[in-house]
Amino acid sequence: HAEAAAFLESVAGDRREEFAELLAHHLEAAATDAALAWPDDDARREEIRSRAVAALVEAGHIVYRRLALEQTQRFGERALALAANDQERVFGVELKAHANHAALRSDESFGFYLEAIDLARACGDVDSETRLRSEATLLCVRYGGAFKTPGWGGRAAAMVQQGLAGVDEHEDTPEAAALLLARAVGLPAWGAGETDPVAARRDALRAVAIAERLEFNELLARALETLGSIVFGQGLCEAEAMGERLIAVADRAPGRVELHETLVVAAMCLARAGRFDRARGLVRDSTEQAGRLGPHRALHAAGAATLALVPSGDLDAFGAATESVARDAAEDTNGVCSSVALALAGRALWLHENGDSAAGARLAAMVESGRATPRPSPDPLHCIELMRPLLGVEETRERLRSVPPRKDATMDVHRLRAGLQVHAVAGDWAEVDRMVAAADALATAACAPVLGFLAQWARAMRSAADGRPDEAVAAATTATDGLAAFGERYTAARVLADLVPLLDGPARDELAETAAARLEAVGARTAAANLG
């Protein structure tokens, strides 16, 4: 085996990566049986063992870049089995941290990062300790929703505060950028700091600048995503620009594990901005990549598909893109984060609209719409809006009440979207009047034109209830035409159908026919059949 490894090394040249796994196999086998080959040569046995560890670590990094995450973890375990000192153990444990990080097993990954940090500190490897703390920090900032173990936030906060105490945040280093992002959004979410939007934006912008100067695309993606979560607190005005910036980052480094989430977030940004055509291609790419990254990543891609394909009325394409949602949810052990909730809600609606309301209800029951999250997210509110046909009026209102209020303009947009629809259908006109006024104001301030159309539709519903059917139909038609032109064809068809029960006679029949045709055109077959 040692001779085979030597031969491979002699002929590999610049194709070493192709032979890395085979080289690791031969060196590992030689190290395992070294006492048989060199019983009296301690130096030779030690040389083979150390080369085997290095080869296993190298192969682990190579298969990680190919998105083979379980193989990555196994290479880490094999390296640890031969490791003889803390320095070698650092690299083996780091591989396990990376594999679990990429698979969104946050608890396991964080544990391995902390173990590797302790090992690096014990052997005086400052560079590894710094790198590992940066990667662990970014895990906690980006994937806090995937943790299941109570108390992880306290450990994350302690790690970050220790790092901030020893770093020069004015230096252009990955560690400084990671710690600035944690200070911006992590420490407040973990109960170790106060929320300050101005300071948070400043820290995030500084992290973006560091990543750009270092030309470190993965770090830049994470910094932009964090900045996006901050600016969305002011509304959707920067959603399209943020999506395009994320696409540019992903295009510069395609295929990297962490950039899968960049595609997902970019698709969500563009969908919230009404750029549904642009978002569709990202959904296709992220769905294709997710098949190699495990069930939780696949559910994140399906969450993006929900935002991009359901409101726009591409329900048939959405159904094809999310066929594995129920299976992935059954296999996933990370719980229901906001992106997974979107995937479940979207698939539940699709099942309902395609005649399997029972299966849709089972998925809808898994959506924890009212669960408090460390950082504000409009996703629970969007889930409630999507699932209104399955939940009914009373359950929809109850779920809306269960989502805690936040000082966040984008959440206000989605609370008004969902609230206008359910309260108008229920005839809660005092609440509708209040929401219409708020929606008209926020539509411009938060760059959310959909709110203006829904406010106009809600006034049409009020007109119908007050016995003015012609006025109601004209206003509702104008409003839903505006929604459809913006790109939300499914939303437009659904709310137009909501007007039908408030009418009677020929006006009702004519509108029912129009609404049914629109619902059928977007793939909402159950709703169309109910009108028929």
Image: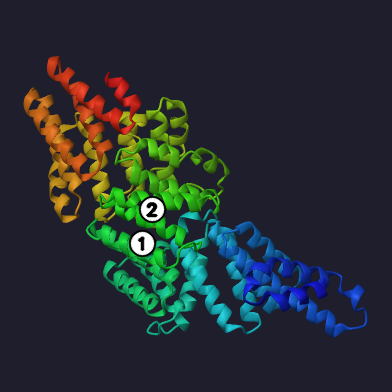
Q: In which quadrant will I find the C terminus?
A: top left
Dots 1, 2 in contact, CB < 8 A: yes
Q: Is residue 453 left or right of residue 522?
A: left
Q: Is residue 111 visible?
A: no
Q: Amino acid at mark 2?
A: Leu
At which x and y percent is residue 158? 50, 71
State the residue lying farthest toward the front. Answer: 11
**Above or below: residue 213 compared with residue 434:** below
**Between 513 and 450, the one nearer to me in the picture:** 513
Q: Give the percent coordinates (x, y) of residue 4.
A: 80, 72
Task: From the image, tell me which residue sits under label 1.
Answer: 247
Picture disc at residue 282: 2
Element type where label 1 sits in the image: helix
- Count up the numbered dots: 2
Residue 493, placed above or below residue 169: above
Q: Position of residue 465 (x, y in %)?
A: 13, 25
Q: Amino acid at mark 1?
A: Ile
User: Residue at point 49% right, 41% down?
Assistant: 325
Element under label 2?
helix
| Label 2 environment density (alpha carbons within 10 Å; few <14, some 14–19, many ≥20) | many
Identify the image quadrant of the N terminus: bottom right
Q: CA distance from mark 1 to mark 2?
A: 9 Å
Side of 362 relative to 49 (left or right): left
Dot 1 surroundings within 10 Å: few (below 14), some, or many (20 or more)? many
Residue at the spot 46% in from the left edge and 58% down from the top edge = 260
